[in-house]
Image (tube, helix red, strand yellow):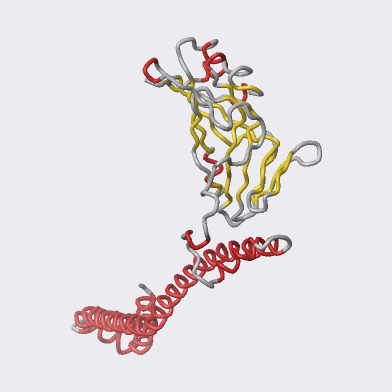
Amino acid sequence: MAQILNDTELKKLIGTVIKNGDENCIRPNSYILRLGPTGEFLNTGKEFELGKNKKGIRIQPGHAVGLTALEVLDFSREIVHSIFPENDLHGLLSPTTDLSREGIVTSTTQIDAGYKGTLNWTLTNTSSEERKFVQSEKIFRLTIFKLGKNEIPENLYCGDYQDKVGYLRSNRAGAPVGMKDSEWEDAFVKGGPQELLDNLIKSGYPWNILGKKLQEIDNQFITVTDEYSKIHHDISTINKNIDIISQNQKNTPQTVQEILRSETQTLQNRWLIGVASIILAISGIILPMVSNEKVASFFKEFGVPIGFGLIIISGVTLYVISKKK
């Protein structure tokens, strides 16, 4: 069964299987490839080479770029058997998670046993922002498998890209020569804007440049439209919340009136209870006292000031009761 190489085994490959390799790029079970100096902006066909003057690349929204790795692989049996005498090596190339978080889309690529040369891949910027990459930046993950006895292929890789260095354009043969336009099927509506734009791009210089610029604007418009849709949804949500708040405000006066009526009734009950309590207390004090002749004569002489005093005390008592919650 194939086994993934660990960090100890990967260190053995630096300088032989992984040329231009760096031990600082080794992870527990993978090697992080770095951005090489050459590539091509696929939307415009412009090739680039990073070096003294140019240190990095910028990828516009909706654009794709073909890239190379700084490292060169050598999975030839002669080199591999010098390290693992009974095994061949197979590779799996995948993007780092940082790329997907930034809206960079790319495919996973396999590297057959026996391959020797530069690694190429393509990145597409699906985000709404420009993305920048500098030379030697760590962006791709290489996982290497050690093939077991029953997994070693009879024939090693010997394709068109064998033993090539630098950025390599596709060698796909494509369609047979001589096919007519009417024999192709595509998504364009006859006479529609996409068909007209495609014809403009195919018309040659300088109209092809104008066509590509219009295509870029169309891609950016699609991105802006998607963002507008999200904003419109957020605005709709805010409007719904405002409607709910407005409805609650309409119901507020009625609620306040109910609270006031309840508080008024409670206050009235407190006053009545307070007055009744005071009257009962005064009656309980006066009746026993009036039955006594000395007390009766005392009230005849001082009854008026005592009466006013009781009235004041009653008022103060009722005021205190009314203030309590």
Q: Which residue shows up at 44% across the image and 70% down it?
A: 237
The C terminus, quarter of image: bottom left
The N terminus, quarter of image: top left
Q: Which residue shows up at 45% across the image and 11% down it?
A: 86
Spot occupied by residue 253 in the image (x, y as percentages of width and height): 39, 84
The relative height of residue 80 versus residue 283 in the rendered view (above or below) is above
Spot occupied by residue 166 in the image (x, y as percentages of width and height): 67, 33
Spot occupied by residue 208 in the image (x, y as percentages of width and height): 68, 61
Can residue 15 be seen in this snapshot? yes
- Left or right of 281, for residue 137: right
State which quadrant residue 220 falls in.
bottom right
State which quadrant residue 260 falls in.
bottom left
- Left or right of 77, for residue 313: left
Residue toward you, 325 or 247:
247
- Left or right of 112, for residue 161: right
Spot occupied by residue 39 in the image (x, y as percentages of width and height): 67, 41
Can residue 29 be seen in this snapshot? no
Residue toward you, 313 or 198:
198
The relative height of residue 31 versus residue 240 in the rendered view (above or below) is above
The relative height of residue 10 versus residue 254 in the rendered view (above or below) is above
Farthest right residue?
53
Residue toward you, 133 or 240:
133
Residue toward you, 208 or 306:
208
Q: Which residue shows up at 52% across the image and 67% down it?
A: 231
- Left or right of 264, for residue 103: right
